[in-house]
Amino acid sequence: MWDRAEKDLKAAVEALDLAYTLKPGEGAFYGPKLDSTCAMRSADNGNAVPCSSTSTCRGGSRGVCRRGWRTTHAGHAAPGDPRLVERFIGILIEHYAGHFPLWLAPVQAVVASITDEAAAYAEEVAANCGPPDWRVVIDTSNEKIGYKVREHSLAKVRS
């Protein structure tokens, strides 16, 4: 059963034209698995569930019943695993080198005032800057405008 599951998993990956590395003997207790950087897929060919001798699977096929138990075949995916999410975020940060696309950036725009007298106007501009769901920072600090531009550029704010 294990050999067949490995063969089926390999065939599926090749049918999708995905790159993979074979690691014979690795897998979970229930079957072989395929790890990629951001997701895990595995074949579970050993689960036995209670059934009657007339049990029919969802697709209409019959399971193999032995003494009231049917061996099932299932696929598992773990895209929501927190470790995978952390790995995915790490890949995004590395890929973009911190220069995220506008929709992904933690801050979409910065409105920086030049003088203290312009602080109220900076707030008005920020309120009308982009769509309502944009994350906008208002910088009314008592720094020179060149310093503000440099600091926000180093923080990789695009707008």
Image: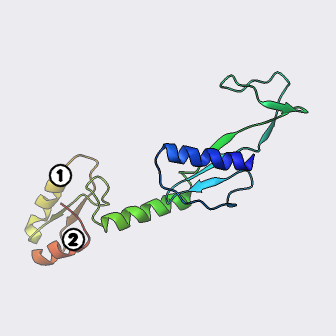
Q: In this view, does 141 lie above or below 85?
A: below
Dot in front, 1 or 2: 2
Residue 1 visible in the displayed image: yes
Locate the C terminus and report the quarter of the image it occupies.
Answer: bottom left
Residue 4 % position (x, y)? 70, 45
Secondary structure at numbered mark 1: loop
Q: In the image, 73: left or right of 123?
A: right
Residue 152, numbered circle:
2
Taking the spot 25% from the left edge, 68% from the top edge, the residue there is 156
Per the model, the C-alpha gap separating discs 1 and 2 is 17 Å
Q: How many labels does the image show?
A: 2
Taking the spot 18% from the left edge, 56% from the top edge, the residue there is 126
Q: Is residue 139 above or below residue 61?
A: below
Q: Pick whichever, 31 or 131, lies toward us.
A: 31
Locate the N terminus and report the quarter of the image it occupies.
Answer: top right
Q: Pick whichever, 57 or 17, lies toward us.
A: 17
Residue 62 % position (x, y)? 75, 26
Residue 142 visible in the displayed image: no
Residue 69 % position (x, y)? 85, 34
Taking the spot 80% from the left edge, 40% from the top edge, the residue there is 48
Q: Pick whichever, 79 or 105, lies toward us.
A: 79
Residue under pointer 1:
129
> Which amino acid, by three-letter code, is at mark 1?
Cys
Q: Is residue 2 above or below residue 68?
A: below
Residue 20, numbered circle:
none
Taking the spot 14% from the left edge, 60% from the top edge, the residue there is 122
> Which amino acid, by three-letter code, is at mark 2?
His
- At label 2, counting other C-alpha atoms closer than 10 Å, the crowd grade (few under 14, some 14-19, many 20 or more) is some
Q: In the image, 42: left or right of 129?
A: right
Q: In the image, 97: left or right of 49?
A: left
Q: Is residue 56 above or below residue 39?
A: above
